[in-house]
């Protein structure tokens, strides 16, 4: 795909990203990796699961592993609202992703718009980006005073131990 700038001239290939919000930070996921956007419900906790695993849920007859992006990125838990209602991951949105034949629900605070971006705004991962995020990020885009952090879906969903992954392949 090619995009046009304000002068109507072509600016080169573009990439589409679904934007999500977690604790006021704007993240992007490659649109070709996103299969669903939905409100998670009926999450069943999994004993002894890693802390980023919220549990399992049913998505149109499929058992889906629910992964909390806030926890995966080492961010603080969402604070309760003044009226006592839950916020953040308790009443957030979910992005359906697939990897290796498995379906995952990435729990986020909110889902934004789809952005079509060209290389003009793309920058390498900043060296001062939190070390917990660096390995989970492919690049950033500078957008009108905001930074869009593009997440590496493969790295994000690779939270199991190498031994367990090797056993699955056998």
Image (cartoon, rainbow, N blue to C red):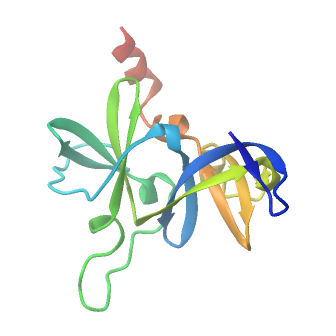
Would you say residue 127 is visible in this rendering? no
Among the 4 quarters of the image, the one containing residue 100: top left
State the residue in front, 106 or 161: 106
Asked if residue 110 can be seen in this view, the reply is: yes
Q: Closest to the observer: 72 or 85?
A: 85
- Tally of marks: 0
The answer to whether residue 110 is left or right of residue 15 is: left
Q: Position of residue 90 (x, y in %)?
A: 27, 67
Q: Residue at x 73, y 72 (%)?
A: 144
In the rendering, at what x and y percent does residue 34 appear? Answer: 44, 43
Looking at the rendered image, the quarter that the C terminus falls into is top left
Q: Residue at x 66, y 48 (%)?
A: 134
Residue 19 higher or lower than 1, as above or below: below
**Vertical relation: 51 (above or below) 90:** above
Q: Residue at x 24, y 82 (%)?
A: 85
- Seen at 41% across and 66% down, the residue is 110
86 and 28: which is toward the camera: 28
- Residue 69 in percent (x, y) is at 44, 54
Q: Residue furthest top?
A: 170
134 lies left or right of 62: right
Quarter location, residue 146: bottom right
Name the spot of residue 32 as percent of width and height, x first.
50, 37
Name the residue at the front extreme. 8
Location of the N terminus (image quadrant): top right
């Amino acid at each position: 795909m090619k995009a046009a700038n304000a002068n109507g001239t072509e600016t080169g290939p573009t990439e589409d990203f679904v934007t999500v919000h977690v604790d006021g930070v704007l993240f992007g996921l490659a649109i070709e990796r996103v299969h669903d956007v939905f409100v998670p419900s009926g999450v069943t906790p999994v004993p002894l699961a890693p802390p980023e695993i919220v549990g399992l849920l049913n998505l149109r007859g499929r058992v889906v592993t629910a992964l909390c992006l806030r926890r995966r990125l080492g961010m603080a838990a969402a604070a309760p609202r003044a009226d006592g209602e839950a916020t953040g991951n308790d009443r957030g949105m979910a992005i359906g992703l697939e990897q290796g034949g498995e379906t995952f629900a990435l729990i986020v605070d909110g889902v934004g718009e789809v952005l079509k971006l060209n290389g003009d705004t793309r920058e390498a991962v900043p060296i001062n980006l939190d070390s917990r995020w660096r390995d989970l990020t492919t690049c950033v885009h500078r957008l009108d005073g905001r930074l869009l952090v593009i997440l590496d879906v493969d790295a994000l969903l690779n939270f199991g131990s190498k031994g367990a992954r090797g056993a699955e392949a056998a």
